Image (cartoon, grey):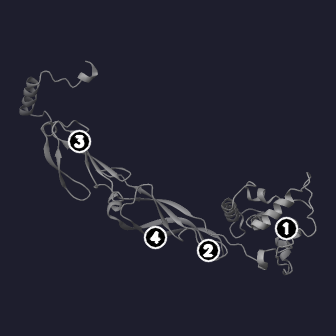
Amino acid sequence: MEFKDYYSILGVERTAGEDEIRRAYRKLARKYHPDVSKEKDAEARMRDVNEAYDVLRDKEKRLAYDNLAAGVSPDGGFAPPPGWDEGFEFHRGAAPGDEAQFSEFFSSLFGGRARRGGAHQEFRARGEDHHAAVEIDLEDAIKGATRDISLRSMQMDAQGRPHMQTRTLSVRIPPGVREGQYIRLAGQGMPGYGGGENGDLYLEIRFKPHPRYRVDGRDLYMNVPVAPWEAALGASIDVPTPGGAVEVSVPPGSANGRKLRLRGRGIPGEPAGDLYLVLEVALPPADTEAARSAYRKLQQELPSFNPRRHMGV
């Protein structure tokens, strides 16, 4: 009899843990399940996958299998020693034809429809999780909102055949959600197999470009134009924020690019983000004789001013 390498069938190492074995099984079950697979040998491959998982998921069976595997001959020949499976309870009362569900190797080791505790378990698997991206307005992240989104996803019809379907879901956007964060919608993924539970839907949050604010985590940045005299002499100015207009003091001697921090006025959270005002010194246009005259006077009053002094010229 040819020895069957259950580790190779599942595509895992012999040191694989329970979680890794379970993930490998689910991946292969979704690929080869006869109800959905287009592979020509899907039924045979599914049988091998079921056999491998049946053995490797059970600690006692896996230990017994590993001990037997140590005695495999170089040519792959194998014969289980008499009484090797004592101590296991297996159901051997299979109906006619059930033995075809398992390989000769499996039947020799486990007695046909072997299942722990004498019960035959049909194939069940949790549905696959879905991932999708959804764009929201920055205001939705700040205040929270409920939005309807449309998704195209693979579904199963009444005959178990896959087809594309458009679904509309009402999604609650919680206040304080961050860009790149995932919102989990339990049970909104792919249907399970054999009565298994549905997978989940994970929505990745993305922000639409905002005309005023830039986002960095929970912090917001906004460019604020100021007049040269406001930057030089200091001033109190009104600026818009997500929570409404506020009065801000511009310190005297503020240079272009200076940041003023407004605590807690960014995206809500624990802690809330901040709003940074980036000052932009705006020059009045010299489009009138009065404006040009003012610039000439300023030039005369500040003859030693050289904005390129730091460049060594």
The residue closer to the viewer here, 141 or 292, is 141
Circles 2 and 3 in contact, beta carbons < 8 Å: no
Q: Above or below — where is 197 with respect to 278? A: below
Q: Quadrant of the C terminus?
A: top left
Q: CA distance from mark 2 to mark 3?
A: 59 Å
Q: Residue at x 54, y 67 (%)?
A: 200
x then y, percent, for residue 146: 38, 68
- Decide which of tag 2 and tag 3 comes sooner along the chain: 2
Residue 169 bears which disc, if any? Answer: 4
Residue type of the residue flagged with mark 4: Leu
**Label located before the other in sequence (1 or 2):** 1
Q: Position of residue 254 (x, y in %)?
A: 19, 37
Q: Which label lies toward us, 1 or 2?
A: 1
CA distance separating discs 2 and 4: 19 Å
Q: Earlier in the sequence, mark 1 or mark 4?
A: 1
The residue that disc 3 covers is 279
Circle 3: residue type: Leu
What residue type is disc 2 on?
Asp
What residue would you read off at disc 2? 157
Q: Residue under circle 1? A: 106
Query: Left or right of 38: which side holds 275?
Result: left
Q: CA distance from mark 3 to mark 4?
A: 42 Å
